[in-house]
Amino acid sequence: MRGVSGVWKDLTNNVNGMASNLTYQVRNIAQVTTAVAHGDLTKKIDVDARGEILELKTTINTMVDTLSAFSSEVTRVAREVGSEGRLGGQAKVEGVYGTWKRLTENVNELASNLTTQVRAIAEVTSAVASGDLSREITVEAAGEVAELKDNVNLMVATLRETTHANQEQDWLKSNLARIGGLLQGHRDMTQMAQLIMSELTPTASADYGAFYLARPNGDGETELALIAGYGVRPTPDGTSFRLGEGLVGQAALERRMILIDNAPPGYVTIRSGLGQASATHVIVLPVLFEDQVLGAIELASFGGFTATHLAFFDQFAETLGVTINAISANSRTEALLTESQRLAQELQERSDELQRQQAELRRSNAELEDKAALLAKQNRAIEIQNFQIEQARRTLEERAEQLALSSRYKSEFLANMSHELRTPLNSLLVLAKLLSENPEGNLSAKQVEFARTIHDSGTDLLQLINDILDLSKVEAGKMEVHPQPLAFTKLVDYVDATFRPMAVDKGLAFGIEVAPDVPGLLYADEQRLQQVLRNLLSNAVKFTSEGEVKLTIAPAGNDEEFSAPGLREAPLVIGFEVSDTGIGISEDKLQVIFEAFQQADGTTSRRYGGTGLGLSISRNIAHLLGGEIHARSQLGRGSRFTLYLPAQYQGAGSPPPPAEVEPPVSSGRPAPEAAAGPALAEFLEEPPADHLDAVLSGRKVLIVDDDVRNVFALTSVLEGYGMDVLYAEDGQAGIDLLQRNPDVALVLMDVMMPGLDGYATTEAIRGMPQFTDLPIIVITAKVMKGDREKSLASGASDYVPKPVDVDHLLDLMRTWLQRATVR
């Protein structure tokens, strides 16, 4: 302002000074904050200031220092962990609060988690590289690190299983080769037997062993005599068993291995200088050569025998049979040589005597020359026989290899044929049942009858497939027995519900009589017992055109003669007698009908059809259950087939007899829950029909199957119950579809698929945390020994064979869906 003076001039100068200072200070603050905003933390406010401006200057400069320290520390940690690979670094920034403090803590937590996870993975992989397969990554992780953790753990588990399997195979092969080498060159049977006991018993982790040699007794029968042992020695009077006598004789009679687990106390006592104890596991192994019993080996152990031990026994028994046969042949050869030498000595003595008698030498020389020629001929025959024995041994080895290969091919063929036959039969039965039910009501009565006929024919074909597979299992010795407590009332209800409608349909009377002194429970394999009774009753109804079919259950009389040791030794034997008034069987056919593919009338013009497998399979199942079947009949007057079983199954691993309950009354059977207890009644109670439909309706199910016929058949049934059906043609597609549809309530999984099979797919699904409790039902047509156990081991919830029984499958689905809902 011009022309002012005095107070106004001073006021003007003061205002201008204030404006100049404020402008300089604000511009300096703006420069620093702008540099910070652009990431430049090297600028600081250096203008002179006082009062609140000074406080603002100090605050901003402190903020820049803190940001610079924070940036430096975070950059250092990121460089060490991310670029240089140095773990364990932490950012240290003093005096930060709020967001900066939380950001610092997050960076440190990130570095700490990454350090912990990487070091844990490195520790396990280093252990694996050093041969330690017992370690596992246990640190918590998520995302791709979690997948890496799971993959490394799966790799270690797979390596551990593979290593264990290889070690077992190495043990098996090395010990077979070692003991087989020790057997070479032996001529004395007793020394060889003692050598086997000394080597075989500790090798198989056994604590007791006995070697029995087959030989004829004074009655001309074969007996098994104890000649060597481990922990036991032969007695002067001799320990021996006839065929079928004791477990040793029974194993030789049946020409199969007998294994006893959990033997009762005092069954076999093993002693030492310090004490004695009872062995818990016993195995009896027959020694065969071309199906001829040469001996038997009995071993006892405190700790049991593994699957590798059993495989070792099977292979060693074949080698031992060849060795024993060779020693026997060599012994006979040596006896012939000794006899030849004795003859030669006699000839020499006779020659000396003839030399002193010159008058007789001329006449006897010719005879001596003939005998010498005969002796040479005998020696040559012996040499030829030795050569033939060696050739026979080599032929036997080749035949054994061929038989093993043939057995493996047969098992594979049966498994594949089972799959190939059951797969198309599955869709046929499911669709035929669906058509026969005529849910939409658009089929005529004739068409419904056609559908039922197709379903019945397919069911007959399925029974034929099952019979053939059962026969092959029996022949291979692979049919299993699963005994359990079985209420007689439940068995009677099953027979009545199954066969009374069949008998009534043919105009026959059908009766079931249960003796008052029959116990309430039977300990046996329910499925196999039902199979035998089903065969006997089906034949009775089939071959009876008028009159009556009756099942009588009663204890066996004292006058019954049994050949099975289990029946002779059992305290109580139950007889299941199936009688009819049918066509009967002639006396000369009573034994023939129990042979495979044999019938009483086997001509092309026979009146009744069938394969002739039922009675053969039933007889073998009866033997497996410890019983036998007796048949009596008169041509034209009916037949009586009686199945005799011990009330308590006495096979390997059988537990103590179950507690008794009240037996049934003949005038009227009690309710199932009264005879079998609350547990059985809870198997038998059915929820109301509307509740069952509500369980399935609206639920989403995934079918994983490469056969579109089965998919179409199952989809048609399930959609009829209001279910939403998804489909995948292989395992990987099923996993992808399941991840896109986490609301899937249940999976139906086929086993035989290209790429990932059903087992691998199930294991992969179980490896995903979100699907740990997802119900997975395996459906397979390859119904062979161990398939069910393999399915459950892979993580499956349940197992259903093809062809699928739709009602059974729906019941399983309801059960698992209800369990999943409760969880």
Image: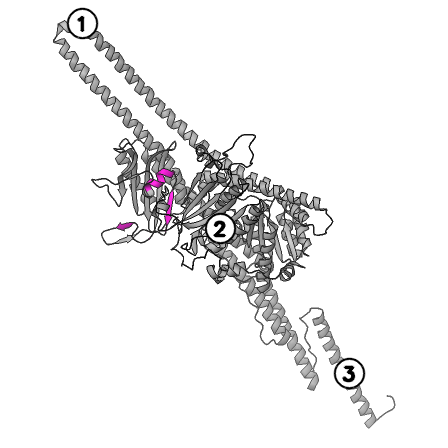
The residue drawn where x is 62% and y is 45% is: 426
Tell me the residue that label 3 is attached to.
Answer: 20
Residue at figure coordinates x 66%, y 51% from the top left: 717
Marks 1 and 2, how far apart in space? 94 Å
Q: CA distance from mark 3 to mark 2?
A: 121 Å
Q: Earlier in the sequence, mark 3 or mark 2?
A: 3
* Callout 3 touching callout 2 (CB < 8 Å): no
Mark toward the viewer: 3 or 1? 1
Marks 1 and 2, the one that precedes in the sequence: 1
The spot of residue 315 in percent (x, y) is 40, 38
Q: Position of residue 652 (x, y in %)?
A: 39, 48
At label 1, the amino acid type is Arg
Disc 3 element:
helix
- Residue 255 drawn in magenta: yes
Within 10 Å of the Cα at label 2, are there few (<14), some (14-19), or many (20+) other Cα atoms? some
Element under disc 1:
helix
Which stretch appears magenta?
A: 248-275
Q: Please indicate, yes or no, whether residue 507 appears anywhere in the rendered image.
A: yes
Furthest residue toward right = 3
Residue 773 image point, x, y percent:
57, 59
Q: CA distance from mark 3 to mark 1?
A: 165 Å
* Residue 512: mark: 2
Magenta-drawn stretch contains 683: no
**Left/right of residue 10 with respect to residue 410 in the rendered view:** right
Sequence-earlier tag: 3 or 1: 3
How far from the left and from the top, in percent, is residue 348? 18, 14
Which of discs 1 and 2 lies nearer the camera? The answer is: 2
Within-10-Å neighbours for mark 3: few <14, some 14–19, many 20+: few
The answer to which of 153 and 219 lies nearer the viewer is 219
